Structures are given as structure tokens and as C-alpha cells.
Image (tube, rainbow, N blue to C red):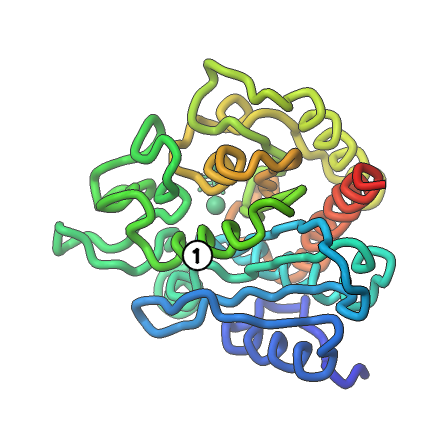
């Protein structure tokens, strides 16, 4: 048993358990794990940023930014982010020249609500101008093509974009954390579920291709192949707008636009629809493995580029 413990993957952790684990890691491994709070939600939960790197090596490292739990009901997403942190603290080769910035639960109010009241809750818990409907879709609240195609101005809809771009504390927290390392970000990944897709920009339109679409596709295919080999699951690769549906104001497009980072992906984890959002606990371990396998492919790509 490690002094800093480990996450559990035979059941979905509570938000509090994830916080305790982050705390233990940063306390016991101060040269590897740092922990910052990037914001507070309406309900008073902290929005955590965990950085993992070999801090004994003093250099301006490339950053890989990972965001999880932006949607409340996609429980496998925070689990995958926590699992990534657990692997990275044991992976010296991946933390020598990379600084990982990981926000495992962007939407803690939603996660807690989904765990205790409404399993299929997606948005955060903000009040809206329409008293009877609660919650903003944080993945429609980012400031690029905000409230465009695939986003709604109706607060009762699952894809409600909010009152204005970055109106929400959670999306602001992601924005601020990204902007802090803007010039060093080489890759950005956001974990969602479900569908088994590896998607890249653009999501807001199918009319234009991203200028890096060739390398985005190549590395996306490499991730899918690695997952198929290691875990036996097929992931479909392509631009978000084409592979799934058009969505404006999502984090991936905003990051692509503001940072110009070469590798930007939204990964829809398991499953293929049999259980959908309600992925059984017996499938967590295999599900988070998919994400870990994919992240190793990206990390290798980033390291090759900077050599
Ligand atoms: O980047 O294009 C994008 C966003 C795509 C996701 C979204 O925010 O709507 C896709 C959905 C998600 O994971 O939230 C897919 C799931 C199955 C859903 O709720 O429709
Ligand atoms: Zn989602």
C-alpha cells in the first residue's frame, strides 16, 4: 500500500474522496504533484487543478492539459482523469519533460447532484432567468462561436449556452487555467462519455476543416489503434462536427482557437450505447485504461516533437 493511497476503480468515487486523494498525493509527493484551486462553484465546491511533473528538473516544459467531469452524468470521465494522475506519479519518463495540468472534476456541483439526486443530470447547477429550469451546459459556455449551431438559448435545454460566454465559474476556471500556460500547451484533451469517439476540432461547423486536420487525424488514429490493441474496443476518429454532431462554445474549439496547440481532442469514452451514461462499476477499470492508453500515445507524440 502506497503512503499516498490510490483511487478506487471498482466503484465511482465521491467528489470528497477524489479531493482527499489529490490532497494526499500533493502532501506526500511535493516534488511531483502540486495542487491549486482555480475557482469555487455556486455550491462552494473547489474547482481543482492538479499538476504532475518532475519538479526537480527546472525547465520550461511542454504542457499537456487534461479536463474531466465537465458533464455531471459522465462519471467515467473524472475516473479517467484520476487514473491518469495515479499513473503519472509512477511514470518518470512521462514527467521529465512534460508538465501535466489536470482538472479532474470541472463540474463538481453537477457531479454531486448526479450522484445524489438525478443520475442523468448533465449541466451545472446555476439558476437561470427561467425559474423552473436550472443549469448551464458548461461545454457550450466557452467564448468561441458562443451560442452558435448546436447550442441553445433555452435554459430548459440540455445544451443551454448560458447568459453570456464564460458566464459560469467552472468555464472561467478552465479558461484561466489554460491561459496561464497558453504558450506551452502542446496537447489538450477533454474526457466525456459515451460513444467511443476520438474527436478533434472543429465542433462548431462542418464547413471548414481545422488547419492541422491531417496530423490531428493521424495521431487520433494512432490512439484508436493503441486502444484496440490494448483493450479491444473500437473508437471512431474524426472532426467532432462530423463524427457526432455540431456543437458551438465547447472547450475544445475555444482552446484550439486561443492556443493553437497542435493536439486537441475530445474523447468520448465507453461504452457504445449498451449502458450509455450509466456505465456499470465493473467496467470502470477497463474504461479508464482506454484513456490511459490514449494519453500515452499523445505524450509520446509531444516528446518526439520537442526533441
Ligand atoms: O466537442 O463537439 C464537442 C462536444 C461534444 C459533446 C457535447 O458536449 O455535446 C458530446 C456529448 C457529450 O459527451 O457531452 C455526447 C453525449 C453522448 C451526449 O450527451 O450527447
Ligand atoms: Zn459530455
Q: Nearer the viewer, residue 195 or 189?
A: 189
Which residue shows up at 57% across the image and 73% down it? Answer: 18
Residue tagged by mark 1?
72
Which residue shows up at 64% across the image and 64% down it? Answer: 51
Looking at the rendered structure, the secondary structure element under dot 1 is loop
Which residue shows up at 61% across the image and 25% down it? Answer: 238
**In the picture shown, does residue 201 fall above or below 124?**
above
Which residue shows up at 30% across the image and 34% down it? Answer: 147
Where is residue 49 shown, x and y percent of the image?
55, 64
In screen coordinates, is 29 left or right of 105? right
- Quadrant where the N terminus sits is bottom right
Q: Nearer the viewer, residue 162 or 263?
A: 263
Q: Residue furthest top?
A: 207
Badge 1 density bin: few <14, some 14–19, many ≥20, Cα 10 Å: many
Where is residue 154 shown, x and y percent of the image?
21, 39
In screen coordinates, is 140 left or right of 106? left
Where is residue 124 shown, x and y percent of the image?
34, 57
Q: Quadrant of residue 17?
A: bottom right
Q: Nearer the viewer, residue 283 or 68?
A: 68
Where is residue 210 shown, x and y percent of the image?
56, 22
- Quadrant where the C terminus sits is top right
Q: Is residue 203 visible?
A: yes
Q: Quadrant of residue 109?
A: bottom left
Q: Is residue 270 visible?
A: no
Amino acid at each position: 500500500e502506497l503512503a499516498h493511497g490510490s483511487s478506487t476503480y471498482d466503484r465511482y468515487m465521491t467528489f470528497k474522496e477524489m479531493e482527499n486523494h489529490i490532497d494526499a498525493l500533493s502532501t506526500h509527493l511535493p516534488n511531483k504533484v502540486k495542487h491549486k484551486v482555480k475557482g469555487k462553484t455556486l455550491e462552494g465546491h473547489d474547482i481543482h487543478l492538479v499538476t504532475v511533473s518532475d519538479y526537480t528538473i527546472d525547465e520550461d516544459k511542454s504542457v499537456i492539459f487534461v479536463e474531466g467531469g465537465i458533464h455531471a452524468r459522465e462519471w467515467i470521465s473524472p475516473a479517467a482523469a484520476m487514473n491518469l494522475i495515479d499513473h503519472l506519479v509512477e511514470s518518470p519518463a512521462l514527467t521529465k519533460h512534460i508538465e501535466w495540468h489536470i482538472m479532474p472534476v470541472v463540474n463538481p456541483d453537477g457531479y454531486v447532484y448526479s450522484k445524489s439526486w438525478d443520475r442523468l443530470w448533465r449541466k451545472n447547477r446555476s439558476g437561470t432567468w427561467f425559474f423552473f429550469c436550472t443549469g448551464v451546459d458548461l461545454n457550450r459556455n466557452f467564448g468561441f462561436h458562443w451560442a452558435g449551431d448546436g447550442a441553445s438559448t433555452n435554459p430548459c435545454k440540455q445544451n443551454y449556452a448560458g447568459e453570456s460566454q464564460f458566464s459560469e465559474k467552472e468555464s472561467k476556471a478552465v479558461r484561466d487555467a489554460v491561459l496561464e500556460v497558453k504558450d506551452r500547451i502542446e496537447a489538450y484533451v477533454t474526457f466525456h462519455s459515451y460513444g467511443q469517439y476520438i474527436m478533434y476540432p472543429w465542433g462548431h461547423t462542418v464547413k471548414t476543416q481545422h488547419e492541422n486536420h491531417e496530423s490531428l487525424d493521424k495521431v487520433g488514429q494512432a490512439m484508436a489503434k493503441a486502444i484496440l490493441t490494448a483493450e479491444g474496443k473500437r473508437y471512431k476518429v474524426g472532426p467532432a462536427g462530423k463524427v457526432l454532431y455540431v456543437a458551438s462554445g465547447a472547450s475544445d474549439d475555444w482552446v484550439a482557437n486561443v492556443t493553437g496547440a497542435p493536439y486537441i481532442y475530445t474523447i468520448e469514452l465507453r461504452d457504445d450505447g449498451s449502458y450509455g451514461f450509466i456505465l456499470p462499476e465493473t467496467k470502470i477499470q477497463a474504461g479508464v485504461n482506454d484513456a490511459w492508453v490514449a494519453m500515452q500515445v499523445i505524450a509520446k507524440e509531444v516528446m518526439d516533437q520537442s526533441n
